[in-house]
Image: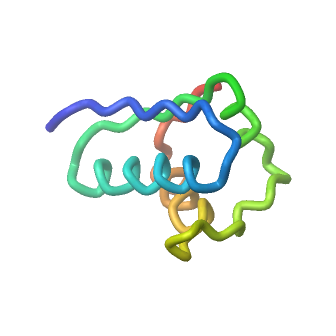
Amino acid sequence: MANFLFVLSKDDSASATRCFQFSKIAHSKGHKVDVFFIEDGVRWADSTRDLSVKTATGDCPNDYLPYLVENEIPIGV
């Protein structure tokens, strides 16, 4: 088992989607995962934020973030 720290520093849906997706994949494979928001990425800590904005690949942050919350993945700001 490895430890992963994913850092999100951008306020765009594509970056957030990939960060949350990779975090979910690593955790589902049994690794310890932490996520940290810095710089413009702290805007993703807003619970009223629209998480349904689609990326070019058709997925969105809401496809992955609920898994992280349900599995109590630490998210620091």
Find the residue positioned furthest to the right.
Answer: 48
Q: Nearer the viewer, residue 25 or 58?
A: 58
Residue 39 is left or right of residue 15, and the answer is right
Q: Nearer the viewer, residue 48 or 59?
A: 59
Q: Measured from the top left, where is residue 72 in percent x and y? A: 50, 45
Q: Nearer the viewer, residue 71 or 35?
A: 35
Q: Measured from the top left, where is residue 45 in percent x and y? A: 72, 39
In the picture, which quadrant includes the C terminus? Answer: top right
Q: Measured from the top left, where is residue 12 in percent x and y? A: 67, 48
Is 61 located above or below residue 36 in the figure? below
Residue found 43% across the figure and 56% down from its top: 21
In the picture, which quadrant includes the N terminus? Answer: top left
Residue 6 falls in image quadrant = top left
Residue 53 falls in image quadrant = bottom right
Residue found 49% across the figure and 34% down from its top: 35
Find the residue positioned furthest to the left.
Answer: 1
Residue 65 is left or right of residue 11, and the answer is left
Residue found 71% across the figure and 61% down from its top: 51
